[in-house]
Structure formats: C-alpha cells, structure tokens
Amino acid sequence: MLKYIVRRLLLIIPIVLIVSILVFLVIKMIPGDPITIMFGKNANAEQIAYVKTLYGLDKPLTEQYFTWAGNLLRGDWGSSIQSGEPVFQMIMERMPRTIALCFCGILVALVISIPTGVACARRHNSMLDLSLTIMNLTFISIPGFWLGMIFMLIFSVKLRLLPTSGYVSAQESLTGWMQCMILPTITTAATFFASLSRLMRSSMLEVLQQDYISLARIKGNTNGRVYYIHALRNSLIPLVTNIGLTMGYLMGGVVVIEKVFAYPGLGLLLINSITQRDYPLIQGILLIFAIIIVVINLLTDLAYMLIDPKIRFGYKKT
C-alpha cells in the first residue's frame, strides 16, 4: 500500500508540469493587454513599455514560462499586476473559503443522495422511485447560477431569513458565518446531489442482482442488513469514482456560485482577475485548482482501498 501511495505521489509531478504549461499558454491566449487596462486611457507608450519590462511581458513566451516556473519552485508566485499584493498570499487567504464551500456542498449532497438512491432501489418502479427520479432530473437540468438566484429570491428577498450575499468569518461570528454559508452550500449541493442520487440508484440495483445478496436473504438477514450492510458498501464504489471525476465540474460550478452570492473565495477572485487580465493571479489560481483536483483524485484512489478489499490487497479479477 505504501509503494502504491508513493507511486501516485510521484505521478503528480509530471501531471502538474503539463498542467502548468497548459495554464501558461491558455492565459497568454486571452485577448487584452493587462498593462493597458491597469493604466487606462491615460497611459503612454513609454509607461506601458517600462511596466512590461518590469513584469517580463516583453520577453519570448518560452523565457517567460521558465522564469515563472523557476520562481514557483523557489516559492515566489509573483505579484498581482492590479493590486501589487503577493499572489500566493491572496490565494491562501481565499482558498479555505472555497474549500469550505466545496466540502459543505459535497457533504450535504452525500447526505441527501445516498438515502434517496437507496430508497429508489428498494422501491424500484414505485411512486416514490418515480417521484425522486423526476426531482433528480429536474435539478440536473437547472443551471446552478439560476438556482442560486431562485434561492436568493425566496429565502432572502421574500422570507428575509438569510443574507443575499457577502461573507462573515467564523472568528468574527459563528452564527453570521453559518447564515452566509447556507445558500451557497445548498446551491452547490443541489447541482451535485441529483447526479449522485441517480448513480447510487443504478449502482444499488445492479448490486442487488448479485448472488451474494440472494444468499444473504436466504440466510435470514433482515432487509435493512441486506441493503445497508451487504449491498451499500459495494454500491459506493461508482459513487466515489464519480465524486473524483466531477471535482473539476464542481470547481467550475463553485466559481459561478461565488459570483452569484458575492462569496469571497477563489472563484470570485478568478473572475475578477480575468476581467482585469491579471496574468500572475490567473495563473496561480488555475494552478491551485489543478493541484486540488489531482490531490482529490489521489484521495479517491485511496478511498477505493478502504471500500473494496480486492483493490487494497491487489487481487486480480478472473
């Protein structure tokens, strides 16, 4: 198991290297000049040329990349073109908020999707199964930003129970933090739990057709034990796979949700930096997103070993 973990950790190095090259090239393809945007209409050619030289934007792309990558290895992520603040400091300030939003959203989605998926499988083709399937398809079809605005209209504007936007840190007020987190968390979970619930349902139905489930029933196990002890564990493997594969989608969705609720996380910072053509900040945020997704995929592989003993001990399927 330790060798497997080491191999997976070493595999992260070339992946991050390739991602860094792609991030650098994609950023350079964005139309617009960040220096011109920074100075506005009053800039002259000499000022623009001087600042480009200061930030190394006048050098060839290859030299710019190796300079940027070398600075990253030394722990220097550069400075924001617009604010002048260190990029790494700006990212570290916002990253815990985005991670908290993603974690809360996934947790709420799992709490909803696993019981609903099992309930649909237990009552296959019943009215409950049909109703939950229609609900899941409805939430899958609704864009996250539109759903967030609907929640905001209902709970903030009409009922006045929750704030429409903004953020309060948990250190300042735990109650205020929870109130600010509810709507973004529910919106994140709503865009995620429907697909997980459908996957859980189909996986559960497939597992229930296996011979060992029939044997468990013949031995006199209760329905609760058959469903939640024997069937549920093997049904979770596709669910764990889906969580790892859709983390990129979730990160993209969080960017939009943070914009809707003015939630000061990495997503909102990324949108603002793209608007201002702040190259160092965009590169740093995208690289952090890529690293987070790679680490989540590693944790997904490790979760396989905890769920399925065959993977843990290296058994080969025949």
Image (cartoon, rainbow, N blue to C red):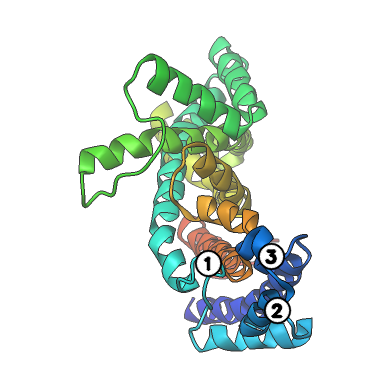
Tell me if 22 is positioned left or right of 91 in this view: right
- Please name the amino acid that badge 2 sits on: Glu
What's the residue at 54%, 65% (across, down)? 82
Q: Looking at the image, is mark 3 or mark 2 nearer the viewer?
A: 2
What residue did someone put label 3 on? 36
Disc 1 crowd rating (10 Å Cα; few below 14, some 14-19, many 20+) is some
> Distance of mark 3 from mark 2, alpha carbons?
12 Å
Q: Position of residue 129 (x, y in %)?
A: 57, 18
Q: Position of residue 307 (x, y in %)?
A: 48, 55
Q: Position of residue 51 (x, y in %)?
A: 63, 78
Residue 99 vs 76, above or below: the answer is above
State which tag comes first along the sequence, 3 or 2.
3
Task: Classify mark 3: helix, strand or loop.
Answer: helix
User: Quarter of the image containing the C terminus?
Assistant: bottom right
Task: Classify mark 1: helix, strand or loop.
Answer: helix
Q: Nearer the viewer, residue 138 or 237?
A: 138
Q: Nearer the viewer, residue 141 or 235?
A: 141
What's the residue at 75%, 61% (across, down)? 32
Which disc, if any, is residue 46?
Answer: 2
State which tag comes first along the sequence, 3 or 1.
3
Task: Classify mark 2: helix, strand or loop.
Answer: helix
What's the residue at 62%, 80% (across, down)? 55
Which disc, if any, is residue 295?
Answer: 1
Q: Looking at the image, is mark 2 or mark 1 nearer the viewer?
A: 2
Disc 3 crowd rating (10 Å Cα; few below 14, some 14-19, many 20+) is some
